[in-house]
């Protein structure tokens, strides 16, 4: 059986989508490699099945006349709790995704359902951007990704490096460059206005 990696990419530089006064330049939705999702899910479910088998074998050794032992009762409680925890973990794995969006104001990212709200890197914090892979990143780089090795490396004004994973690094780089240029133009306009006042 073959599993496809689901990744959708929208480059809206052709047709600007507006969210209020903010235009979306780039949006990408990535899902983790399905073979990893299935592998972890199988391991979790197999472990749960083995625990239930152990519980059943312990049940066969219990005597109903004297009642169930304290150890067996605690094991039943553990089985009950782990059942829901494993189901929640498996459901999270199959629904996990990484969303990157670039508007005219900032770069946004989130990892639903674990992180449902967008976090952002504002345009005035960005100095430069370049395509990169996880193999050649500077030490101390903050990695924000869900799969693969490709993406962009963004250098911030405080000289920190942030790697954003992407299956479309060239398109993402162009969108970030546009974001930085917009910030430069706005800063230049503000400076000119201040000069005029002075």
Image (spheres, rainbow, N blue to C red):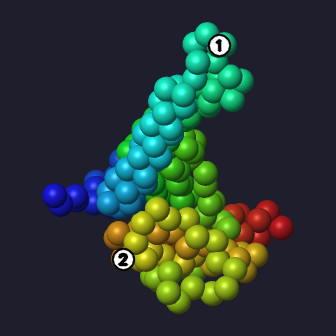
Q: Nearer the viewer, residue 65 or 175?
A: 65
Image-based side of 146 in relation to 141, left or right: left
At horizontal 63% and vertical 87% (from top left) the residue drawn is 138
83 left or right, relative to 3 = right
Question: In which quarter of the view is residue 74 placed?
Answer: top right
Question: In the picture provided, is 94 more to the left or to the right than 111?
Answer: left
Mark seen at residue 67: 1
Residue 147 at x, y percent in the picture: 42, 66
Label 1, label 2: how many angstroms apart (C-alpha)? 68 Å
At mark 2, the secondary structure is helix
Label of residue 192 in the image: none
Q: Establish if 45 lies above or below 28.
A: above
Residue 121: quadrant of the picture: bottom right
Image spot of residue 89 (x, y percent):
49, 41
> Of the residues under marks 1 and 2, which one precedes in the sequence?
1
Q: In which quadrant of the rendered image does the N terminus lie?
A: bottom left
Foreground mark, 1 or 2, reads 1
Q: Which mark is residue 170?
A: 2
Looking at the image, which residue is at 37% across and 57% down?
39
Question: Which residue is located at x 43 percent, y 52 percent?
Answer: 43
How many numbered marks have been drawn onto this rendered protein structure? 2
Q: Residue furthest top?
A: 65
Q: Are marks 1 and 2 in contact (CB under 8 Å)?
A: no
């Amino acid at each position: 059986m073959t599993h496809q990696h689901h990744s959708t990419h929208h480059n809206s530089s052709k047709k600007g989508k507006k969210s209020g006064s903010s235009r979306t330049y780039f949006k990408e939705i990535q899902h983790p490699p399905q073979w990893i999702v299935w592998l972890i899910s199988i391991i979790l479910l197999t472990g749960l099945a083995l625990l239930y088998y152990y519980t059943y074998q312990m049940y066969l050794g219990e005597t109903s006349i004297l009642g169930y032992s304290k150890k067996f009762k605690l094991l039943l409680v553990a089985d009950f709790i782990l059942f829901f925890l494993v189901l929640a973990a498996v459901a999270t794995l199959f629904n996990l995704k990484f969303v990157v969006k670039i508007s005219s104001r900032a770069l946004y990212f989130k990892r639903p359902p674990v992180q449902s709200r967008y976090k952002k890197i504002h345009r005035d914090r960005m100095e430069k951007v370049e395509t990169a892979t996880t193999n050649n990143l500077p030490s101390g780089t903050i990695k924000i990704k869900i799969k693969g090795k490709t993406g962009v490396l963004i250098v911030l004004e405080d000289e920190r490096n942030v790697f954003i994973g992407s299956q479309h690094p060239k398109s993402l780089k162009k969108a970030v460059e546009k974001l930085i240029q917009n910030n430069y133009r706005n800063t230049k306009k503000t400076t000119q206005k201040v000069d005029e006042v002075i």
